[in-house]
Image (cartoon, rainbow, N blue to C red):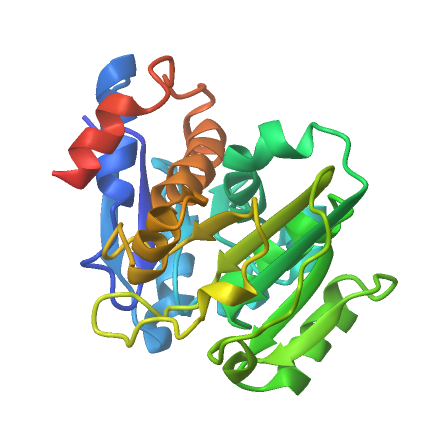
Amino acid sequence: MSRPYAEVIGDPIVQSKSPIIHKFWIDRLGIDADYRACHVPAEALQSYLAERRADPDWRGCNVTMPHKQAVIAALDRLDPLAARINAVNTIIREDDGSLTGYNTDVAGFLEPLRDHLAQTHYFRMARIMGTGGAARAVIAALADQNVMLVVAGRDPEKARALLDELDPEGEHHVAPLTHFAEPTDFAFDDREGCFDLLVNASPLGMDGQPPLDLHHSHIPPGSVVYDIVTHPLQTPLLTEARSRGFETLDGLNMLIGQAAEAFSLFFNQTPPRDDRDAALRQLLES
């Protein structure tokens, strides 16, 4: 007898932790369902979606690199947030076989920042390292929270184009990534009543990639340092920031948060998170 299932697709896909996360919740809830990883290269993307569209047991899929924008052309409709960001990380098969694209990365990214953002601040600023697909969700998420952004990339023109696309009315800034590599003697103002955030939304620091070259003098006192890389979980950026007394957030925060939103869309149930994901994190870190 067939049973409902969802998947994660990408190229490559072997590194994905999504099956561990979703199967953990499926088991905890006792749902008769499955969640799989499926390697889908770019040339097979259209045929994959056409086949799954015809499968009534397929609830949908998570979409990882490099397909978050490429899938859009094959979908029937987009959730407004996904349309604004122009990136899809979750596809849902509707009862009539049509496909709807969502972006749960925004909610996942913001989840561990909720307590901070619920407070009243005189000023909010985030320094975002990276201009790739992940940065799109980070920029949109923080712009909606009235955060002034400094986006740094190898190509500042690309950073400016992202800001102009995602928050054209915002007063944001761009900088070359190399600007943050050299020490600065900038004297930060009194940060009381302010919220400062530094986000690595680039692959730098990931296994197989060089570390993010960022000098600690660019991080204002009291900042939160957030690295969305998950391989390894403790990146050089986080290790250094923690040693200097900064609050740090690792990549599992966003990964689990976005998965929780997608799980609800796939299976119409809220995933069990009563232990603040302690057991799931232990499983993912083992």
Q: Is residue 227 left or right of residue 153?
A: left
Residue 118: give x, y in percent of width and height. Answer: 69, 28
Q: Is residue 90 left or right of residue 203?
A: right
Residue with the most extreme right position: 169
User: Residue drawn at (39%, 50%), measured in percent from left and top?
Assistant: 244
Taking 91 as reference, is 48 above or below it? below
Quadrant where the C terminus sits is top left
Taking 120 as reference, is 102 above or below it? below
Residue 102: give x, y in percent of width and height. Answer: 57, 47
Of 90 and 242, nearer the camera is: 242
Quadrant where the N terminus sits is top left
Q: Quadrant of residue 186?
A: bottom right
Q: Is residue 20 left or right of residue 204?
A: left
Residue 69: give x, y in percent of width and height. Answer: 53, 67
Q: Quadrant of residue 125?
A: bottom right
User: Residue drawn at (74%, 37%), measured in percent from left and top?
Assistant: 193
| Res. 94 in view | no
Of 49 and 228, nearer the camera is: 228
Taking 40 as reference, is 189 above or below it? above
Of 217 and 30, nearer the camera is: 217
Report the label total.
0
User: Residue drawn at (56%, 44%), measured in percent from left and top?
Assistant: 222
Residue with the most extreme left position: 286
| Res. 106 in view | yes
Residue 63: give x, y in percent of width and height. Answer: 41, 55
